Image: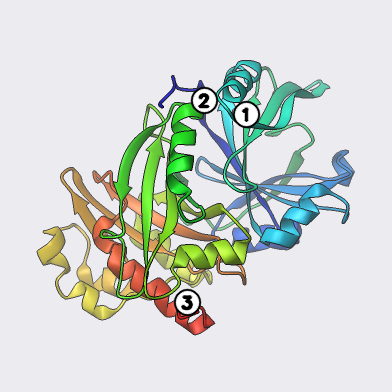
Amino acid sequence: MQAPPLPIRSIHHIELLVGNAKQASFYYRNSFGFDQVAYAGPETGNRDMASYLLRQGNMHIILSTPLNPEHPHSEFLKLHGDSVLDIAFEVDNTDTTYKNAIERGALNVREPKITGNDKNGKIKSAAIRTYGDTVHSFIEKGNFSGTFLPGFEPFAIKGKSTGILFPDHIVGNVEDRKMDYWVNWYKSVFGFHKFASFDDKDISTEFSSLRSTVVADQNETIKFPINEPAEGRSKSQIQEYVESYGGAGVQHVAFLTGDIVDTISLLSEQGVEFLEIPDTYYDSLLDRVAPIDEDIDVLRKLGILVDRDDRGYLLQLFTKPVADRPTLFYEIIQRKGCRGFGKGNFKALFESIEREQKRRGNLDL
């Protein structure tokens, strides 16, 4: 059942729990080009966590590390490794948004609470649980005029920008036969609607397959694809993720860019590793997607994928996992009218992922 939309305004930030936030900040600055903007930790009054705020375009990422083994987030890290904890939303009224979500069946993580009450003002936030141990925070900024959130103080270190603008979509992997449950959860709790869906005929290779449904808010600026494994000859990438992660969680975040050739070139120069696309993919590319503005030889060199729908085309490429566990990775995407997710690239993408699975010894398990 689709409920009336929750009054959320936008994605406020994405928070990752990591084993060493100071080193992770260095990596995201020097590889992905984020600016470090602010810091929260013992020196700013937070005795339990160290957090670094990164920004590029309208994309905000918080990297956080618990500072003692008894902290609940230490158990999260032990189970899941470096990964997304929180997809946080900005709202006009935390109390109302939280109350509506709970009444619609959401599970409480943190009841509405005021933080910060000094010269910079205060905010009110709350949080609910979504798939796995992932949470959604609701943040009401009110009259707060400080650095992003209470407890953060300016700590600026520039990164080399790579042209990332904001999150295009955020993908969750869930256990087998749980996709419909979470799609219906977003419809009934958030009032999201089904934006697109793909079955194992759309997303499959000789060895493995998956099913995916995309839910979106009423403005279709927030889009969450939900994936589940489907039966195949070998272990699918979704099942590998669920086993490596220890349950359901965020598989990847897609970063929108206005010039993917420039972005991928800079990211590659700065050490970001991407999936390898075979040369044969480009032999019939123009027959499939019709004329495009970009030079095919440049796309071939960089491994950039292209797909088209009735509104235009998109260009995309996926990083390898950014930690040793084969879990979290990123997508770089540029849209030229296309509203899809690269359906025509699913087979090439899956085959590239399967080559990485085989190298890890996980494809045939």
* x and y, in percent, of residue 324 in the image: 62, 72
Classify 307 as above or below 168. Answer: below
Q: Which mark is residue 322?
A: none
* x and y, in percent, of residue 333 in the image: 37, 54
Circles 2 and 1: CB atoms closer than 8 Å = yes
Classify 60 as above or below 110. Answer: below
Dot 2 or dot 1: first in sequence order is: 2
Q: Residue at x 49, y 83 (%)?
A: 359
* x and y, in percent, of residue 139 in the image: 64, 27
Q: CA distance from mark 1 to mark 3?
A: 37 Å
Q: Nearer the viewer, residue 178 or 36?
A: 178
Q: Which mark is residue 357?
A: 3
Q: Quadrant of residue 104?
A: top right
Classify 194 as above or below 326. Answer: above
Q: Which mark is residue 138?
A: 1
Q: Secondary structure at mark 3?
A: helix
Asked whether, in this view, residue 355 is left or right of residue 300, the answer is right
Q: Amino acid at mark 1?
A: Phe
Would you call the spot at circle 1 few (<14 residues within 10 Å), some (14-19), or many (20 or more)?
many
Q: Nearer the viewer, residue 23 or 235?
A: 235
Would you call the spot at circle 3 few (<14 residues within 10 Å), some (14-19), or many (20 or more)?
some
- Tell me if residue 176 can be seen: yes
Q: Secondary structure at mark 2?
A: strand
Q: Amino acid at mark 3?
A: Gln
Q: Quadrant of residue 60?
A: top right
Q: Secondary structure at mark 1?
A: strand
